Amino acid sequence: FSRAWEIVVRYAAAGAFTGAFWLLYLLSDTVLDLVGVGILRDVLEIDPVAPILTGATLGLGLAVVHELKHLISPKIVLRLLRLLLPPVVLVSAVFVLLVPVQGLSGVVSELSAGATVMAMALALISLITITIDRNAAEAAEASTLVRSAQAATVLALILAALGALAVSLRVAQYGWTPERLLAALCAAVFVGYGMTYTVATLRRAALAAARIRQANITMAVVTLALTALWLTPVLNAERLSARSQLARFEAGKTDAADLDLWRITHTWGRAGTRAFAPYRQDDHPAHDALVDRIAALDAGDLSPRTFEPQTSAEILADLSETLAYRPAGTDGTELLTALPEYTRLLIHRGCTHERTPKDAPACVGVVADFLPTPGDELLVIYRDGDKFETVAANGAYLELGTAAGPGLIDDILDGSFEMIPARGMELKLGDTYVAPLPDR
């Protein structure tokens, strides 16, 4: 226990040093740019430089931390982290209580939302372990922390179950991919932790901490076993994903035009190529339906840059994974379907071909009661080259108040905006205003 947390603390300290290095680097670049010197920015444009500098700085930080290991104790950090358990439990409890009121759709309809919920479950699991520590002598004694840990066991199970439900719905809709398989395994591990913790707490509170410590050992072994299986043919993510996507095609759940052959045969490596090999044979029952797509694949016409969705359903499916909605917890999928198909295609291109300065998909949807008409409206902002485009559902057009900076979408994703009354409601980001207006 102590050795594991010592490793975490060392890497955290080295990571903080690396972050400080990059902060000073960018600050230095900004200062030099004021006098027309852009050498630091030019150096970063050389592909290997950024990762090499990051690795070198992290290594230097680890070396210094190792030299000072007698001064750095994980106990201080763990004692501080314990204090985070009550507020995290409070936030989680409020979330769980409001889910039935707000509905499950916003939580389980998107894999990104499910990942957020699972991250919260992981935070609770970690804080529970930190609170009970390695033995009774080191465990927290304050009643607030003890009761918070007991409540956290149940909350962790609920959150992990919601995350698992989100993954299962995505798999049922679109089949397996390596990312969804990894998410499913993580969800299974978190549910396992939540179940063992909850059972330990409900059986007898006095022995809960001891049982949780034993559960940690058991779940650690399970996690290691799953990690080992991930490196064997048993859980070969690419093979399982390719077979899943091809099985959906043969079952009629995916059209030939919607089958992403490039990802199967290129991104998923040998496993995907082998899974698809029988479909290239003339005597395969599905060969005729794929013959044109196979020819386009072999000609290089289905590369990631040139592949475009062939159907409206595929566009909506892709947007459901890439288009984030704000405020958090809102879902504009129904409003999005009201947009013309061509408009959705333009939004999709912004989501898939453009990135924000923080490397997020360059698109965001804001759901709010912008207009005096009944119901909410959807405001979609996406990047198209060097400019932003704005689209509103519900029969409105948009007016962009001032020139927006490159971080406009990142600011919205981070929640750095206000909803203010005007002729209707406007989206305010610093000096930038975006407002959907009624048709004139």
Image (spheres, rainbow, N blue to C red):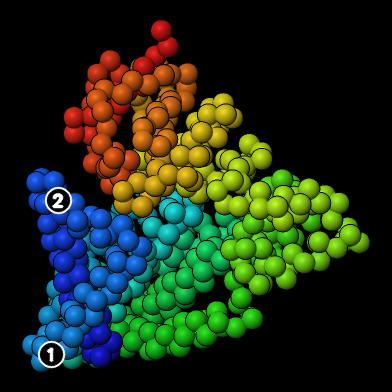
Up the image or down, 73 lies above or below 286; here it is: below
Bin the neighbour count of mark 1 within 10 Å (Cα to Cα): few under 14, some 14-19, many 20 and up: few
Q: Label 2 amino acid?
A: Val
Q: Which mark is residue 67?
A: 1
For marks 2 and 1, give the one nearer the viewer: 2
Q: Which mark is residue 192?
A: none
Position of the N terminus by quadrant: bottom left
Tag 2 residue? 37
Up the image or down, 358 lies above or below 273; here it is: above
Place of residue 429 in the rendered image (x, y in percent of width and height, measured from the top left): 23, 34
Q: How many marks can you see?
A: 2
Place of residue 403 in the rendered image (x, y in percent of width and height, measured from the top left): 26, 28
- Write the residue at 80% across / 61% down: 279
Query: Is 424 displayed left or right of 439 in the figure?
Result: left
Place of residue 365 in the rendered image (x, y in percent of width and height, measured from the top left): 40, 37
Residue 439 visible here: yes
**Viewer-proximal residue among 333 and 312:** 312
Q: Give the mark nearest the N terminus, 2 or 1.
A: 2
**Viewer-proximal residue among 352 and 374:** 352
**Viewer-proximal residue among 316 and 84:** 316
**Viewer-proximal residue among 346 and 321:** 346
Query: Is 276 displayed left or right of 332 in the figure?
Result: right
